[in-house]
């Protein structure tokens, strides 16, 4: 969180008055020995005081005194039970703006470029980071980090919501007043499973920690290209409450490692800098190729065969129904193709039915389509009072932007012209029959709209 310059001046003056000169970066004060003093709780109390009125200088004085006593006085690491201390231990991510110049911080690893992972004890005033000496009093660094991350996972998530990418897809937003919110990126795999009920996808996650109070992440799937740009610009908090930046980058989480997919220029501009492996993982899958057997049957052979029967198709019903004729035609189409291009007829069936107000016809269910523009369903219909069949299809389609699957309603005219009648169609037989009936009953053609519904 951010401490404004006026408040920072007051805090520095009070520290100096108590004999401890400090510099203030972000929401942390540092003295000349590299010791840190968290100021987040003080800033929140000053905000509440501003609305109610009260002794501002006295509040700062008392809080600074308590911080100094806790940091420089007798350490509870020497007196409190170890298990009690371990139960209050958490990992805390600290960005470069809050780090003292020249300090190496060998006890705080760098899980993200420029961002350090400290171990911190939860104390009355907020969080108190441990020095290397303090960590040594509690145990090995490996043991302490495992315990700190387990404690972090046990904390309730303050706020979780979904945000939409500008061109489809969504990403998760975790936010809260806690300075530990962004630290949850260190346990991202478990957090993802907790919030979604699913394992992390094989290609990992895209993640961002704009500030200590914000964590964004999304699965690396066919929508990740859409959410990448949105996540770069996204901020949870209103401008007036913006926390100091923790990291401007987007990271690829895979197998427990976070690698940046952006870079900063010398003048501070953020560039997209994806590693080749990420671009391969993030690329939408190539659309499957249509199968000639399926396509030739539904879009060429079937309309020609049904039209050749003319109105007798629905006035002189063959014994055994229409399905045996469909199976025979399917075999004829396959016989003209190489053996490796033939498709099983599983699911192929036909039925006679009414469409709308008095229109008769045949509705054909096709084997499941796998690629555009293979068809889910087809219908040859004799409109009431007409002597010419009309042939309609519901075709499998894929949104070219979001890669979302859907369907469109089309018609093949007698001269072999394909017409797109509506988008956002349903591949269900009842809905298809109703749509065809509405068209034949003179229903107005629906206006153009987005191909797929969200």
Image (cartoon, helix red, strand yellow):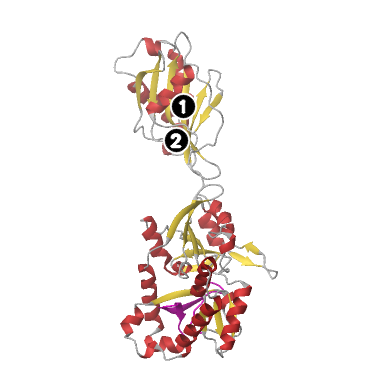
- Disc 1 crowd rating (10 Å Cα; few below 14, some 14-19, many 20+) is many
**Which x, y percent locates residue 167?**
56, 47
**Which x, y percent locates residue 301?**
46, 24
Residue numbers of the magenta segment: 106-131
SS at mark 1 in the image: strand
Q: Is residue 351 visible?
A: yes
Query: Which numbered tag is attached to residue 338?
Result: 2
**73 w.r.t. 368: above or below:** below
**254 w.r.t. 419: above or below:** below
Q: CA distance from mark 1 to mark 2?
A: 26 Å
Q: Magenta includes 41?
A: no
Q: Quadrant of residue 192?
A: bottom left
**Which x, y percent locates residue 112?**
53, 72
Residue name at image x 44 percent, y 37 percent: 341
**Which x, y percent locates residue 62?**
49, 82
Residue beneath disc 1: 393
Q: Nearer the viewer, residue 292 or 97?
A: 97
- Disc 2 crowd rating (10 Å Cα; few below 14, some 14-19, many 20+) is few
């Amino acid at each position: 969180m951010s401490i404004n310059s006026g408040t920072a001046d007051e805090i520095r003056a009070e520290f100096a008055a108590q004999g401890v000169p400090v510099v203030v970066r972000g929401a942390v004060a540092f003295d000349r020995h590299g010791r840190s003093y968290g100021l987040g709780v003080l800033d929140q109390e000053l905000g509440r005081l501003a609305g109610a009125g009260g002794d501002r200088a006295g509040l700062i004085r008392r809080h600074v005194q308590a911080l100094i006593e806790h940091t420089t006085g007798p350490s509870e690491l020497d007196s409190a039970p170890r298990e009690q201390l371990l139960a209050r231990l958490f990992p805390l991510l600290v960005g470069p703006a809050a780090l003292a110049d020249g300090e190496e911080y060998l006890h705080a690893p760098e899980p993200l470029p420029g961002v350090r992972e400290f171990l911190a004890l939860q104390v009355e005033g907020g969080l108190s980071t441990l020095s290397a000496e303090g960590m040594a009093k509690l145990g090995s660094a490996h043991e302490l980090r495992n315990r700190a991350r387990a404690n972090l996972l046990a904390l309730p998530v303050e706020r979780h919501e979904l945000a939409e990418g500008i061109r489809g897809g969504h990403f998760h937003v975790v936010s809260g007043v806690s300075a530990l919110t962004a630290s949850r990126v260190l346990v991202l795999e478990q957090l993802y499973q907790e919030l979604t009920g699913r394992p992390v996808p094989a290609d990992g996650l895209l993640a961002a920690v704009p500030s200590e109070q914000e964590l964004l992440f999304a699965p690396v799937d066919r929508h990740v290209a859409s959410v990448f740009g949105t996540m770069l610009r996204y901020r949870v908090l209103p401008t007036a409450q913006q926390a100091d930046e923790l990291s401007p980058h987007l990271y690829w989480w895979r197998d427990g490692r976070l690698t940046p997919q952006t870079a900063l220029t010398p003048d501070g501009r953020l560039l997209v800098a994806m590693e080749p492996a990420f671009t391969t993982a993030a690329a939408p899958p190539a659309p499957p190729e249509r199968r000639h057997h399926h396509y030739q049957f539904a879009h060429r052979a079937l309309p020609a065969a049904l039209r050749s029967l003319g109105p007798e198709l629905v006035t002189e019903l063959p014994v055994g129904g229409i399905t045996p004729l469909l199976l025979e035609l399917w075999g004829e189409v396959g016989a003209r193709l190489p053996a490796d291009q033939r498709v099983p007829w599983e699911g192929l069936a036909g039925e006679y039915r009414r469409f709308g107000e008095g229109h008769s016809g045949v509705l054909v269910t096709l084997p499941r389509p796998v690629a555009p523009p293979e068809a889910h369903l087809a219908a040859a219909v004799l409109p009431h009072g007409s002597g010419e069949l009309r042939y309609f299809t519901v075709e499998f389609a894929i949104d070219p932007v979001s890669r979302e699957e859907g369907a469109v309603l089309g018609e093949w005219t007698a001269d072999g012209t394909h017409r797109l009648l509506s988008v956002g169609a349903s591949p269900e037989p009842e809905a298809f029959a109703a749509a065809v009936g509405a068209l034949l009953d003179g229903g107005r053609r629906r206006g153009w709209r987005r191909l797929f519904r969200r």
